[in-house]
Image (cartoon, grey):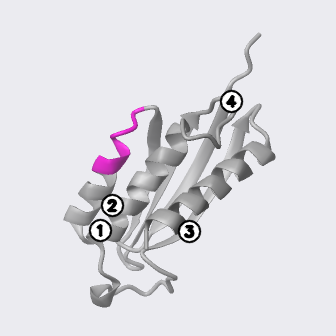
Amino acid sequence: MLKLMLACCKVYISESRNRAALDSIEQAARLFPQATIVNKFEDETYNRVGYTLVSKLTPEPSSGLCPLKNTVFAMVKAAFEAINLEFHCGSHPRLGVVDHICFHPLGCTSMDQTAGIAKSLAADIGSTLQ
């Protein structure tokens, strides 16, 4: 019997009031329909949005063919392009446009597999988005 490999990713972005920025971020996520936004939490006071995404994984999820990683990367890129923190106002302390990304294993996925996705995503963000 084939065991289901799934992973969850939580992404927090320092914006919840700029509708055009949120639309751009969500449009980027829709480019990869294999990964789904299952929850969106907008906090007006903090001016911050949290997305929860879920996707099936392949046996080698840290490879370039990981829909979850590719979706999160596209969302981060869209956020960097759409948000200017010089004009940001919110009561939540922030580290940047995207201040939190975490991956969680679901199903029979191991912590090592999700850690591999996180490391691969971090390398892509660090080498591509300056």
Residue drawn at (38%, 61%) of the image: 77
Identify residue for label 3: 100
Give the spatial CA distance, label 3 vs label 1: 17 Å
Identify residue for label 4: 5
Return the disc, 3 or 1, that comes first in the chain's sequence: 1
**Mark 4: amino acid:** Met
Q: Is residue 58 above or below residue 102?
A: above
Return the disc, 4 or 3, that comes first in the chain's sequence: 4
Label 4, residues with CA under 10 Å away: few <14, some 14-19, many ≥20? some
Label 1, residues with CA under 10 Å away: few <14, some 14-19, many ≥20? some
Identify residue for label 1: 81
**Mark 1: amino acid:** Glu
Q: Residues in magenta?
A: 27-33
Proximity of marks 3 and 2: CB atoms separated by less than 8 Å: no
Q: Residue furthest left?
A: 20
Residue drawn at (51%, 51%) of the image: 52
Tell me the quadrant of the picture where the C terminus can be found.
bottom left
Tell me the quadrant of the picture where the N terminus can be found.
top right
Q: Residue 129, position in %: x, y? A: 43, 67
**Mark 2: amino acid:** Ala
Residue drawn at (46%, 54%) of the image: 73
Dot 2 falls on a residue whose secondary structure is: helix
